[in-house]
Each structure stands twice: as structure tokens, then as C-alpha cells.
Image: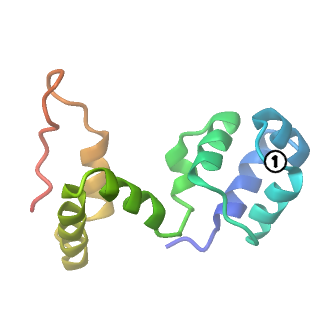
Amino acid sequence: MSTRTLGDKLKELRQARKLSMRALAERTGLKSPAFIADVERGFRQPSSEALATWATALEVPLDELLAFDRRPPVRELKNLIAKNSSWASALRRLAAEGMSGKVTPATLQQFLNQEPQKPGLQKAFDLGI
């Protein structure tokens, strides 16, 4: 596992594009340069919305930033379950299968990235569970 942080990745991408913190803040219209500095130093954590906006501004896939976000997605999962309670049992099963090693992050990502065979059909991929 990498020891690089989300802040490290954000700074790397920003500097590779020769953007100052102020320029990134202005480009996104989101937060201040001070907030970006705090994220880069690991003092604060951005919202999922901020990450998505930064990914767009930095022209990278959102997954590239999310890979460095080590926080558990508690709020997002609670909101998902509140909208549809069936998610609770599905996520518990996924967690159990992940803990047992039957499902890995790679197999789950492969499943999520696969295109459906025909419009309206479920993705056909065997997660092995």
C-alpha cells in the first residue's frame, strides 16, 4: 500500500500543470487557496464534490484522486441506504466477501468498469460470490 496521501497527489497534479493554489481555486470556483493548502498538508479533507471538481479541473479521472482518499465513505453509504434499504444487506455481504478474500478491490473495479452487453441489461460479470 502506498504511503502517499491525497494531499500529496493533489499537489503533484497541480504542480505538474503549473498551477498555483490560487489558480486551482479560481479555476474551480471552489474553496480558497488556504483550503487547498490545508488539504495538501493533510490538515483537512475535501468533500466528494470538491474531489470531483478538482479532478475535472486537473483533467484526471476522479478515480485517480479517490484512490488516495483513505476515509471510509460513511456519509455516502448512509445516504445510499436511506434511499434504498436493500443496499444495507448488499454492502454487508460485499464487506464479508471482501474480508474473506473472495472479492478484491480489483475484481469489484473490473465489474464496475465493464459495459453492459445491451442497453438496460445488468452487467454480466462473475464476482465469484
Residue at 51% across / 58% down in the picture? 67
Residue extending farthest to the front is 82
Residue type of the residue flagged with mark 1: Gln
Locate residue 38, reporting x and y percent. Answer: 81, 65
Locate residue 8, reporting x and y percent. Answer: 71, 62
Residue 20 falls in image quadrant:
top right
Q: Residues within 10 Å of mark 1 (few under 14, many from 20)?
A: few
**Secondary structure category for the residue under label 1:** helix
In the rendered image, the vertical position of residue 29 relative to residue 96, given as above or below: above
Residue at 80% across / 33% down in the picture? 27
Judged left or right of residue 36, residue 60 is: left
Q: How many marks?
A: 1
In the rendered image, the vertical position of residue 89 relative to residue 51, given as above or below: below
Residue extending farthest to the bottom is 100
Q: Which is more toward the observer, 74 or 111?
A: 74
In the rendered image, the vertical position of residue 122 relative to residue 102, given as above or below: above
Q: Which is more toward the observer, 126 or 82?
A: 82
Judged left or right of residue 54, residue 66 is: left
Judged left or right of residue 102, residue 50 is: right
Q: Which residue position is annotated with label 1? A: 15
Residue 34 falls in image quadrant:
bottom right
